[in-house]
Amino acid sequence: MALYDVVVVGGGNAAFCAAHAAREYAERVLIVEKAPPERAGGNSYFTAGAFRTAHNGLAQLRPLLPDLTDEQSAVIDLPPYSEERYLTDLRRLTEGRCDPELSAILVGDSFDTIRWMRAKGVRWELLYARQSYRVGDRIQFWGDLAIGAVGGGVGLMERHLEKARAVGIEIRYRSPVVELSQGEDGIAGVICRTETGRRLIEARAVVLASGGFEADPRLRAAYLGPNWDLARVRGSEYNTGEVLRLALAAGAQPYGHWSGCHSIAWDAQAPATGDWTLTNRLSRQNYPLGIVVNRQGKRFLDEGADFRNFTYAKYGAEILKQPGGIAYQLFDAHTLGLLSAEDYGAHGTTRVEADSIRGLAEKLGLDPAALEGAISEFNAAVQPGEFNPAIKDGKRTAGIDPPKSNWAQPLDRPPFVAFPVTCGITFTYGGLRVDADSRVIAQSGWPIPGLFAAGELVGGLFYHNYPGGSGLMAGSVFGRRAGAAAGRRAGEAASQTL
């Protein structure tokens, strides 16, 4: 029976970052993945590939963007995003609950980790389509989210896999972990269920990076509450929480917001779990440009409360609370040209269009009088001001509840277009407690020897809400730390046996 230095459980971005980092310190690194190879990649595969990193502006990012020309750079407005602002956003959105040490690590390691990933073969690009608008002759980035992996989540995972194979990291698919092997000095490996039965894989260190429990409807209902079993799953159907529960059974300390999750506005006709062809293109994220109503024709949230990056992860839950768990994003000729082609392109999109509000309501099966009344009330409440989607323009409504705090324009210019949306859950916030080296902390408060964790099964970073792009960034930062610490432990253990 072969002994591995490090075994990484999972197959997404956090797992591969852990494996790459472990390989810098150890020879024999193995990834075990529950899914078959054609369904591998975890939730990372389904993302847009955006990474929230602190930076000093475009000049610092340019070395990571070899395809960006001087001519393109000259017309780009991309303000710096300091570590202080990043931390402020984390604290603000999590209502001050984010773990101080983990948050500081996420922010402080973010740019260096992006640079490290570039050395591992990940290619970066500016997120023009999702995070900028052309204002006059300038391209203005907004929401402090600037770069992403070329090819989105699919491209990200392709680069990870190429690098892993190039440096000799072994990958076994269809190998769900069913038990953590306990040794005299802590975790000594994993037991996988394979086509030929249970198989023990011995290792000097184990990194858990297998995601949360969002794909298990029973656990969603148990921890998140009523009707969460009805939510659509944006990503991998394999993230059902078994490994998280194995770690808890082994004495790991639960941590974080167990009744909270990342969930967004998702196409109402999407399948129950992630679409492996459309991936992220069923998201509907331009709602700040229009208004959102429920089946009763009533608005129920402030579409312009903040940039999309700072509200989208909590608005899925608001949609789930509405009758039937469905809502309708409404736009007109004022803003149709600003909608993201990635989110609202014809492929895979449920789009309803009419020349009048009454006609739109009839096509949607809504009460025409109710919808006309709600839009008339909204239009009358819109205050004067200059509309600018690239800044929080303060163009608001007055005298209605809920208000629209920015980007308020009357819906009065046909064609009128609606996109039916539901709640799409991305990942759960509850997980395991880890320290600065991503060692899993036991109920006793001490690290569990040989056990590390990264990615979406780590708790303590996100509560209630989430700054867009922080999930992939956290997976990379703590995956790198977990893999490095696991690799060092394996090296020390190997030297003691010589």
Image (tube, rainbow, N blue to C red):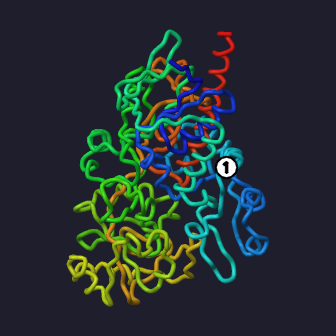
Q: How many marks?
A: 1
User: On screen, 366 above or below 203?
Assistant: below
Taking depth in this image into account, of 458 and 202 the one nearest to the observer is 202
Give the side of residue 138 with respect to residue 397, left or right: right
Note whether residue 295 is visible.
yes
Give the side of residue 350 with respect to residue 141, left or right: left
Residue bearing mark 1: 121
Note whether residue 458 is visible.
no
Taking depth in this image into account, of 103 and 343 the one nearest to the observer is 343
Q: Position of residue 479 (x, y in %)?
A: 58, 37
User: On screen, 327 above or below 53?
Assistant: below
Q: Position of residue 6 (x, y in %)?
A: 57, 26
Dividing the image into 4 quarters, which one contains the C terminus? top right
In which quadrant of the rendered view does residue 58 lie?
bottom right
Taking depth in this image into account, of 225 and 114 the one nearest to the observer is 114
Secondary structure beneath label 1: loop
In which quadrant of the rendered view does residue 255 lie?
top left
Q: Residue at x 35, y 32 (%)?
A: 195
Q: Position of residue 311 (x, y in %)?
A: 47, 59
User: On screen, 106 above or below 184?
Assistant: below
Q: Position of residue 461 (x, y in %)?
A: 52, 41
Taking depth in this image into account, of 327 and 426 the one nearest to the observer is 426
Q: Residue at x 50, y 20 (%)?
A: 202
Farthest-out residue, front: 196
Q: Amino acid at mark 1?
A: Gly
Give the side of residue 228 with respect to residue 337, left or right: left
Give the side of residue 264 with respect to residue 115, left or right: left
In which quadrant of the rendered view does residue 135 lie?
bottom right
Dot 1, crowdedness within 10 Å: few (<14), some or many (≥20)? some
User: On screen, 299 above or below 232?
Assistant: below
